[in-house]
Amino acid sequence: MNARRDLDDATPAQGNTTRDYLEALDAAGQLINDASPDALERALAAIARAADADAAALYRHGAGSMRADNVGAWRGKIVLPRAVAESLNRLDYRLYRDLHETLSAGLMLERRASELLPATQVMLGPAGVQYLLCVPLLDAGELIGFLALAYLEQPRRRVSGEPRFLATLANYLALALVRQQAEQRMGVNALRLATLVGATEDMVFELSADGIVVNVWSHHPALPSASLIGLPLDMAFPQDMAWALGQALPRALASEAREQFEFTLPRLEGVIYCIGRLQAVPSEDGGRRNAVALIRDVTELMREEARRRAMIDTLDQLEEAVIELTQEGRLTRLSAAWSTLRGRNNASREDLEQMLTDYVDGSDHPPLLHAYNQVLSQGEPLSVRFRLLRDGAEPLWLEARLLPNWGADGQSHGLRGVLRDVTAAHLSEEHIRQLALYDGLTGLPNRVLLDDLLHQALARAKRSGGRVALGFIDLDHFKQINDAFGHQAGDQVLATLARQIRSVLREEDVLARWGGDEFIVMLPDLPDLATLSQVAERLREIARQGIVLEGIETRPTISIGMAVYPDNAESAEALLRVADSTMYHAKSMGRNNVQFYGDIVHLKSIGREHMAIQTRLNHAVLGNELQVFYQPIVNARTGQVSSIEALARWHDDSVGWITPQLFIPMAEKLGLISELSEQITVQALTKLRGWRDRGFMQPLALNVSRNLLFSPRFVRNLIKTVEEFKLRPADVIVEITESLALTDQARQSRHLKQLHESGFKIAIDDFGTGYSSLSQLHDMPIDILKVDLSFTARLNNESGRRIMQAIVQMSHALGLDVVVEGVETLEAARFLQGLGVELMQGFHFSEPVPAGVCELYLQLGLDGKI
């Protein structure tokens, strides 16, 4: 019970371990009724999966024995030579004293192979075992065997309560072994009694009508063994036994049926429970009838039944409901928690023989029935979520772990399930998904979800040779609405417009909010271009429906730019870009119209366009129109965000997003870099102040240009700006490029030293692209080295991996923190982890994202990426 509670309280990241242990518990529980080799192997496999082990084996022996026999194993991917496998079938504790001393004390043995005695190491060596976990199996405090779990490498760190859960599993295995041994003894005794040959643990004898013992065929160890023939009952047997026989004998002689009776015999080691049967038979002399008695010791069965009842009582105390189903889904067994989940105060049997689907929300029937079929056909456990209907209350979200109910013939004759209330977790997941993927005002998909849906649509179109249309929609003169009626009225207009546009689209079409007063409509599987024209015109007309604001009816208009894949663009990014530029062309044509990219003839040369971008950049900087995106730097050991890099982004009204590689040098050339950097710094520190107020303590990295670093007032101004936001210098990482760090070294070293002494951390960005050496960097006040992404891109060959290893080792030797940029694949992340790199940045973890998405990463981490 405590082990389950510990695992239930584990973090979401440990949820998979919980489910694996529940599966192991069910598999071990089946051994009580099914001791077949297949059932044992399935149970050992489930336990190995739960404990993350590479192999599992079960050994048993009699109490006090110094030899243990292997009764079952699951070896996973371990392949053993025949001679080695045979040597592991029987273990002599006298050779493996470290096993016996620990296990006989009732303790788990969990050690590296190198820490064991030499004899034990020799035993494990041919199997390649590096780590061994042995759990004792006890019966009445006596060691009767153990469960062995083998690992080919260091296992993962165990979650809270896991050792206690392993002990619980060991108790079930011990119970199964004791039950198996008891049943084996009963089978042998029954055979001996049936043939009346040899000795038996059951006592078989014959009584005359006067209660005299006339024949004895078999003795019982707990009953008298001397010659009993000719003795009356009260002299031949203990008092309780003689009294029970005396009461049953007349009834047996008077009836043709067997007469059954029970009695107990007190012993020093505990009470013995016996069941007796009397059957009348003709006497040898043909006179009065005699009776044959069979006395059976059922002490072990009684103890087993008590343990079984205790297990059932334990299951009834769990919050999870345990159910059994027929193949059709009809309920045949329910634990007490079922009534609790159904919202009832007392347990009820009325649900038995009903279909489980009778208590499940109708919309959840298909996935539940599909899960039935999968489990029954494949024989593998499966999890499914559904809503359970309750008496007079809201439905609960349950997670059901379904597994086959194996019969004695090895076939699946039904299902078993463990039902757990996951309502709180489900609603939390839905809320987080809503925040991450949907716009809070309109409820429409946001940019993140749109990007995923667009890529899926283009992939389908590429396979089928179809088309996908994309429309950029902008609400005309929206600023006037905000100015005249306020932002609350503006939000009302946007929400109403979203509903109107959605009403004229097909079910498969997607409407997303791009931001501000801009929307995007995506039409997948476009049948023809004529349909596109019709949809565009319907969109323009529906937007002109009146909206009443403070008693005044307004009729907004929209400008639409349409583009088609693959006619106008061959990628999602290009399709967005051309649709965006087409929308701005529609606005320049007088607004309230639809333009198609294929109808636009571009006459501007590259040079003229470049000049136009410079002009618009000047307006954007002066108008404070640049934005800040944030890219997390992730601790690859924990998955938590270690720090955030602030990056400038510019969305130009004419051509869409402009790459920083274009506008940053352009701003430096135009003398705008100081104003641009100031805007980015103020926006980033404003956001950082808000994150600090919400408890997020990660530092923020700011990129510093050549002009700013060499400015005489740069250090003083930065310190003042940080103080104005009630932040500390330690909250900010100043990033400079490697080439900048080596330019005019005397001047920049002075500024870097001042920054470092003030409490700022200094990072060298794009390391490896300049001409520095690590010895030069060692002379500078530097804390962090960011390895350029060009090195990460070469990790697919041996020379690239060696260069990366050398950089990391030398950086660590100089006491520098290392951040590797450009990590785009899980394989690269895993390799870098092997080199000891903890801090990584790249598209595998996250591209630069808006502040809202970055805040989710700060809150939830990115452990799913490692």
Image (spheres, rainbow, N blue to C red):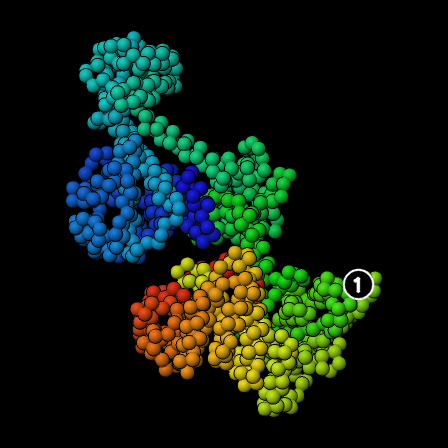
Tell me residue 481's x, y (percent): 76, 68
- The reply, left or right, for residue 716 in relation to residue 216 is right
Tell me residue 361's x, y (percent): 61, 47
Closer to the camera, 299 or 662? 662
- Residue located 29% across and 43% down the image: 108
Q: Which quarter of the image is occupied by the C terminus?
A: bottom left
- Residue located 22% across and 17% down the image: 224
- The reply, left or right, for residue 619 in relation to residue 791 is right
Q: Image height check: is 131 above or below 229?
A: below
- Residue located 29% across and 18% down the image: 266
Give amino acid for label 1: Leu
Give the quadrant of residue 293. top left
Residue 707 in view in this figure = yes
- The reply, left or right, for residue 124 in relation to residue 598 is left
Tell me residue 30's x, y (percent): 39, 41
Tell me residue 342's x, y (percent): 57, 39
Number of callouts: 1
